[in-house]
Image: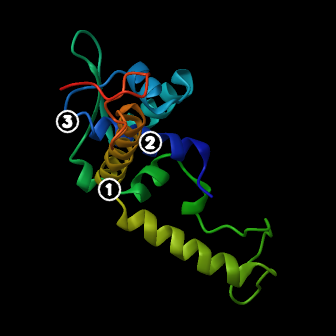
């Protein structure tokens, strides 16, 4: 429902917010979030022009949030990148579509769009960073569970089925 650029921007901003205030290189963001670096660089440039991020060249440079993550809504991100969801357009592309002259999808689209816009207004970059942090923690926990030795009576065997002396 949101454009690819907005999705990438939200992911990138969440990654930047998770960096604890230190500037992050576009290359690092791209690698961490598995995004194409050249396209991400253009998105970061657009976000900088709209005042959502600050970029700094040179040693110790990178991309930082222009203000606290809790103060940047996803609506601001979508608006900064001119996402179609932020402008009232007809879902079917009808030139004239309103409550008075509704297209077949008007009622559905009006309600759905209102829900999406409310989500964008209420959700912040801090929320995205917190979600990503929880997701990474769960993935790390799952990886550790796979690597952990088995528990129980056969836990201390050494490939022979015999229990090792402790």
**Mark 1, secondary structure of its residue:** helix
Placement of the C terminus among the 4 image quadrants: top left
Q: Which mark is residue 127?
A: 1
Residue 11's tag is: 2
Using the image, determine if residue 21 lies above or below residue 104: above
Q: Earlier in the sequence, mark 2 or mark 3?
A: 2
Give the secondary structure at mark 2: helix
Look at 52% across and 74% down and name the residue there: 115
Residue 157 in percent (x, y) is at: 36, 28
Q: Residue at x 72, y 70 (%)?
A: 90
Q: Report x, y in % for residue 60.
A: 21, 15
Q: Is residue 12 left or right of residue 108?
A: left
Q: Quadrant of residue 163?
A: top left
Horizontal relation, residue 47 to residue 90: left or right: left
Q: Which residue is mark 3?
A: 20
CA–CA distance in space, label 3 to label 1: 14 Å
Q: Residues within 10 Å of mark 3 (few under 14, many from 20)?
A: few
């Amino acid at each position: 429902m949101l454009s690819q650029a907005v999705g990438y921007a939200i992911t990138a901003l969440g990654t930047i917010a998770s960096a604890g205030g230190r500037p992050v290189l576009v290359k690092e963001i791209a690698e961490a979030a598995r995004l194409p670096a050249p396209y991400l660089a253009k998105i970061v440039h657009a976000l900088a022009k709209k005042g959502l991020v600050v970029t700094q060249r040179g040693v110790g440079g990178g991309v930082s949030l222009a203000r606290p993550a809790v103060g940047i809504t996803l609506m601001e991100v979508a608006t900064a990148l001119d996402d179609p969801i932020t402008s009232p357009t007809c879902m079917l592309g009808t030139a004239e579509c309103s409550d008075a002259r509704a297209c077949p999808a008007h009622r559905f689209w009006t309600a759905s769009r209102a829900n999406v816009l409310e989500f964008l207004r209420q959700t912040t970059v801090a929320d995205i960073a917190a979600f990503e942090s929880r997701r990474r923690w769960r993935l790390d926990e799952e990886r550790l569970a796979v690597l952990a030795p088995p528990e129980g009576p056969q836990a201390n065997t050494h490939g022979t089925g015999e229990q090792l002396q402790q």
